[in-house]
Each structure stands twice: as structure tokens, then as C-alpha cells.
Image: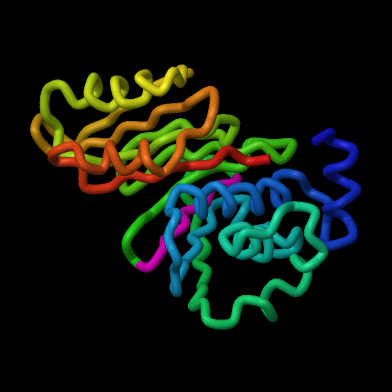
Amino acid sequence: MEQKSLFSVISPIMVGPSSSHTAGAVRLGLMARNIYNNEFTKVKFILYNSFATTGFGHGTDKGLLAGVLGYSVDDSGIKNIFDKASGIDYSYEYREDISRHPNSVDIIFDDKMTISGDSVGAGEIRINNINGFSANIDGSYHSILLMYKDRPGMISKVSDIIQKQDINIASLHCDRSSKGGAASMYLALDIPVGDDIVEKIRQIKDVFFVTNVRKLK
């Protein structure tokens, strides 16, 4: 979406046409929703720095909630999102932390998964941490995210399943808590995979979480 059209759709529905504080907030919520990929009844947002101090006036709180509920940046329903979130227990905290990006947020679903990300400008976002594991996700690729017990051969097992479907892996990022401990793997793909591929990965020994993450539009 061009920047001009982005501002034109944000301005009428949020207070303050800020791409970082409004469109970026919606897209952070959407990306977190895509990663969690489960129904949820509780979500907590911890806003940092500029998000915390000036975000309220720009509709950052509305944008984040709208995103996790599946609204796109041009949806006029965002302006009344608090009236549309029945059945969802949502809350906000506001903090200062000089180690975090000026427009940073932690999104916590059902006290089970914490997804941290930044709004980096012009509506662009980056997810940098998921449940304590480093990440580098900007929503520009379809991808697979999994968590597992670290052991030799896991990367080759997962990549083999994908490549047998003639799907190219654009990039791969791994992290682990310790040797033999919990680990994560993120694979950015040129095209989306079906749920059957995700199920095959789920059946690999010691994989305890896997999700099919759709790219942002």
C-alpha cells in the first residue's frame, strides 16, 4: 500500500494520522494474531516509550486491539473497537525502557505466549521476540514457526519436509535457550504451505509448538 493511501485511510478513523502509532500498531496486532494462530479470551498489551507516552492520542491502543481481533488498517470499525471486543479480556500497561525501541510493545495472549515487536516507521513493523526467543519477522513472507527441544538434525528434518513440496526457503532463523534446551525456528517461504505440511512438522519428535504464519497484506 502506498504511503499516501495509508494516511488517507488512517486519518478518518483514528486520532492523529501517524503511520508509526496507528497503522504500525494495527499491523503489529495482526502479525501477533497470525503467529499465535489460536482463539483467545485474554490479551495484554505492554506499551513502551513513545507508544506509552503519546500513543493514546494517536489511537495506538485501539490499533493494537483491532489488529489482534483481525481488523485491517483501513477498517472503519477501528474507531469503535472497544465496543466490538465483547468476550475479550484486554488490558494495557505503560512503561519506559531505554533498551527498547521508541515504538515497542509486548502482546501477551492468554498468559501463554508473549510476542514483542516494534513499529519502525511508515507503517512497517518487526517482531523481534517470541516467548523469549529472538526473531526477525516483518510480515513480508508466509512462514512457519516452531518450538522444540534442541537436538541434532532438527533443521534438516524440517527443511526436508518443505523442500519435498518444491517450496523455496527464503530465510531461516534459529535460537535456543541452551544446548539441549528449548529452541525456536522460523522459516520464511516464497509461497504459503498447506496445513498438511504443518501437521507433518508437528509429528517430528520433540516439536511442541508449530504454526503456519500468513504474511501481512
User: Is most of the magenta stretch helix, strand or loop?
Assistant: strand
Would you say 35 lies left or right of 185 here?
Answer: right
Q: Does the magenta run of residues contain 108?
A: yes
Question: x, y (%) of residue 176?
Answer: 22, 33
Question: x, y (%) of residue 172?
Answer: 38, 22
* Camera-side residue of 188 and 200: 200
Question: x, y (%) of residue 31?
Answer: 55, 47
Question: x, y (%) of residue 165?
Answer: 40, 23
Q: Which residue is found at the position 75% from the left and 58% from the top?
A: 58
* Camera-side residue of 202 and 103: 202
| Residue stretch in magenta | 103-110
Query: Compared with residue 151, is residue 56 higher up or lower down, i.e. above or below?
Result: below
Q: Which residue is found at the position 41% from the left and 63% from the top?
A: 109
Q: Which residue is found at the position 62% from the left and 42% from the top?
A: 119
Task: For residue 42, say whether it is visible.
Answer: yes
* Camera-side residue of 194 and 190: 194
Would you say 11 lies left or right of 56 here?
Answer: right
Q: Which residue is found at the position 46% from the left and 21% from the top?
A: 167
Query: Compared with residue 149, is residue 79 higher up or lower down, i.e. above or below?
Result: below
